Image (spheres, grey):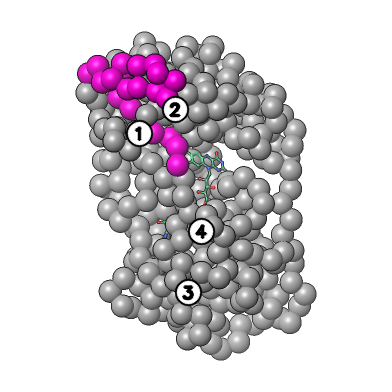
Amino acid sequence: MGGQVSIPEGVHVVVVGGGFGGIAAAQQLKSHGVPFTLIDMREAFHHNVAGLRASVQPGFAQRTFIPFAKTFGSSFVQGRVENVDPERQVVILQGGREIKYSHLILCTGTDGPFPGKCHSESSLEASVQKYEDLLGQIQEADSILVVGGGSTGVEMAAEIKTEYPDKKVVLIHSRIGLADPELLSSVRQQAKEVLLEKGVELLLGQKVNELSELQLNKTQKNMQVSTDKGETLTTDLIISCTGLRINSAAYSSALMSSMTDSGALKVNQHLQVHGFSNIFAVGDCSDTKEPQTAYAAGLHAAVAVTNILNSLRGAELTEYRPGNVSMLLAMGHNDGVGQFVGYRLPRFLVALGKSRDLLLWKSWKEMQQTQP
Ligand SMILES: Cc1cc2nc3c(=O)[nH]c(=O)nc-3n(C[C@H](O)[C@H](O)[C@H](O)COP(=O)(O)OP(=O)(O)OC[C@H]3O[C@@H](n4cnc5c(N)ncnc54)[C@H](O)[C@@H]3O)c2cc1C
């Protein structure tokens, strides 16, 4: 791993959020011998990239949670950060505990509907159980409505139909184009083709009325759902895959003037938060102009840690420049579409590289633990 740097006394990096960005930052700090504390409200890292598979394949959910303490020992603190005080250089946890920092890396990510995201303070076992419960609901339903045809909705519909080909799966999307708009149009078209080949029914250019009023993730035979185009659908189960929002609660009062309207932190080319040389933002909560991906969060983490080390050495800071979009969509364990640095990949390659195991091996390796 990385070389040791002579660390001046008083240097202590606090990393808030142990998602893809946070664990990458913490591992790099560890490997360079930099004192750090990683704080997350949960007891385990969640490889949410595989959260959808965990909802359809019995026994899979266990593999998507990796305990923090086993990897980071006493450098991990479980707790919810409620505030940051940049003047006193402390983060303040729920309950009042304060942790001092010389440098702060904020990587609080995004939250969104279950099962794509599972941000809760519940135990590892309870989180796994939440997935097993949804799996039971999916198994019970004859027809399932997936709401939202961004990348998560596309993957969800494909996962269900692959695992349960006899169930009726409908994907409703407010726009005509499926998946992320930043993807090549040929990749988005391919995603549509794969869904149709698998037998997913598509309802494009329509919205479900009053989604917030509907019972989600619970099987109830023959529910009636209306759309803004006046159609009525009958379904047994509704799964929402729409509406990610940035987790800004940890910093929103202290860093309000450095935030965008969406709650993301404005950063310069060194990923320093506007107005602060010792606060960095990494991953989904940073306002880098690119799609929010785990892949990008890992790249950000490397830049933030390098810049902390460079600032300690008095060296020039390195820059982060978003590259061409790389994004792979797993469409069940046996298919997938995507692009790497702007080039469309053949479906079999995505299936081989991502869809089979959803890159779980990478997170277990990064956390230096053995997959169960
Ligand atoms: C279904 C799905 C599939 C995806 N597939 C891919 C993929 O294949 N490839 C890819 O590159 N990207 C994928 N993404 C996107 C990827 O998941 C995100 O970009 C990535 O998780 C961002 O990492 P992050 O570290 O910024 O934040 P997150 O992973 O969101 O983690 C944030 C962490 O911060 C913690 N936290 C938040 N607030 C606080 C607080 N106040 N106090 C303490 N802790 C806090 C949370 O508990 C959480 O652990 C997918 C997303 C979804 C929803």
Q: Is residue 48 visible?
A: no
Do labels 3 and 1 touch, CB within 8 Å? no
Labels 2 and 3: the sequence-earlier one: 2
Residue 355's disc number? none
Mark 1 vs mark 4, CA separation in Å: 23 Å
Q: Residues within 10 Å of mark 4 (few under 14, many from 20)?
A: many
In-front residue for pair 290/64: 290
Labels 3 and 1: the sequence-earlier one: 1
Labels 2 and 4: the sequence-earlier one: 2
Residue at x 42%, y 49% (from the top left corner): 111
Looking at the rendering, the stretch of residues picked out in magenta corresponds to 221-243
Labels 4 and 3: the sequence-earlier one: 3
Q: How many marks?
A: 4
Name the residue type under label 1. Answer: Leu
Do labels 2 and 1 touch, CB within 8 Å? yes
Which residue carries the number 4 mark?
Answer: 263
Q: Residues within 10 Å of mark 3 (few under 14, many from 20)?
A: some
Q: Quadrant of the C terminus?
A: top left
Mark 4 vs mark 3, CA separation in Å: 12 Å
Q: Residues within 10 Å of mark 2 (few under 14, many from 20)?
A: many
Which residue carries the number 1 mark?
Answer: 211
Can you tell me whether the CB of the residue at mark 2 lies under 8 Å from the nearest atom of ligand 1? Answer: no
Name the residue type under label 2. Answer: Lys
Which residue carries the number 2 mark?
Answer: 207
Labels 1 and 4: the sequence-earlier one: 1
In-front residue for pair 208/289: 208
Callout 4 secondary element = loop
Which residue carries the number 3 mark?
Answer: 254
Q: In the rendered image of this protein, does residue 142 appear above or below residue 352?
A: above
Residue at x 28%, y 20% (from the top left corner): 224
